[in-house]
Image: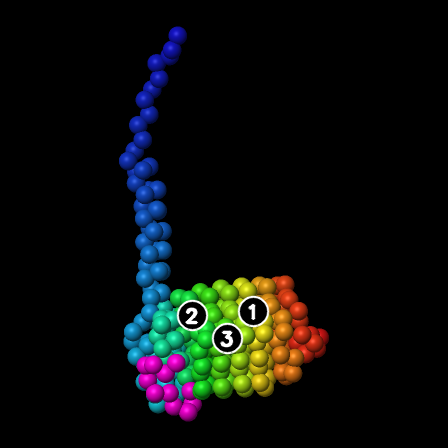
Amino acid sequence: MSMPGKAITLSPRYFFIPLLIFFSFTYKSISAQEALTPNPLAEAWILEKVASGEVADLSEQFRNPSDRVISAEFLENLATGTLTGIPRQGVRIANATIVERLLFENIDIPYELHLESCEFRESVDFSRSHFAQDLNLSHSRFLKPIDFTDSRIDRSLWFDGATFENQANFSLAGVGRVFILQDAVFEGETDFSLLNAGVQVWADGAQLQGAWILLPRNLAAAWS
């Protein structure tokens, strides 16, 4: 024989609170994504600085890090001289954030390119490119893979203090003067196979935390 049961009525607040939490997190997520969109004011300011031969350190002009986001297309066009004439000092940018995939493959850059203390949130491709002067990526942070396969840097390649959180591929790369890796941290797999053996390497304090492939003698000596 079935016993009569007492109906349970839930207060509307038991449904409202979870929905409120859900929409709160959704709003924060959307807001974060919207915050990480390229800032046209930052890009215009960079153009002015580059044209005058100065370093475009975005932290000096834009105190909020979310205002320092520049597009990959802007950086690609700037580096190739499409947007403005490049002075003899080259392109020098610091403290920028790039949230899109950066495609620098198969390009020829005749002047210095500095992207120091920058954050790259998507993959970066420098494969088969040629840099006639220094390429400086000191203290930058790479969250996704970076590819330097078969690239050529006639002078020095700077990665001192940089952090690689994913794969880093330097296979078949050529550096004319000095490969600077002091205090760099490689957290993912790193490929140095057939990196030109004659380059001078500075690697004091560098850390190979992930797997590595074919560490050349000059690199191995610098790490020892």
Is residue 123 in view from this perspective? Answer: yes
Label disc, if present, on residue 113 of the rendered structure: none
Instruction: For marks 1 and 3, give the CA distance.
Output: 12 Å
Check if residue 82 falls in the magenta segment. Answer: yes
Instruction: For marks 3 and 2, give the CA distance.
Output: 14 Å
Callout in the foreground (3, 2): 3
Callout in the foreground (1, 3): 3
Q: Amino acid at mark 1?
A: Asn
Label disc, if present, on residue 128 of the rendered structure: 3
What residue is rendered at 62% in x and 71% in y?
A: 192
Give the class, few, some or many, for how many residues have Cα within 10 Å of label 1's Cα (few <14, many ≥20).
many
**Placement of 3 over or under 87, stated as above or below:** above
Label the magenta part by its dominant secondary structure: loop
Instruction: For marks 2 and 1, give the CA distance.
Output: 15 Å
Q: Amino acid at mark 3?
A: Arg
Extreme-bottom residue of the structure: 88
Instruction: State the scheme by which the image is colored.
Output: rainbow
Q: Which residues are magenta?
A: 80-90
Is residue 64 in view from this perspective? Answer: no
Q: Quick one: label 2 or label 1, which is nearer the N terminus?
A: 2
**Considering the numbered disc 3 on the image, is that residue within a helix, a strand or a loop?**
loop
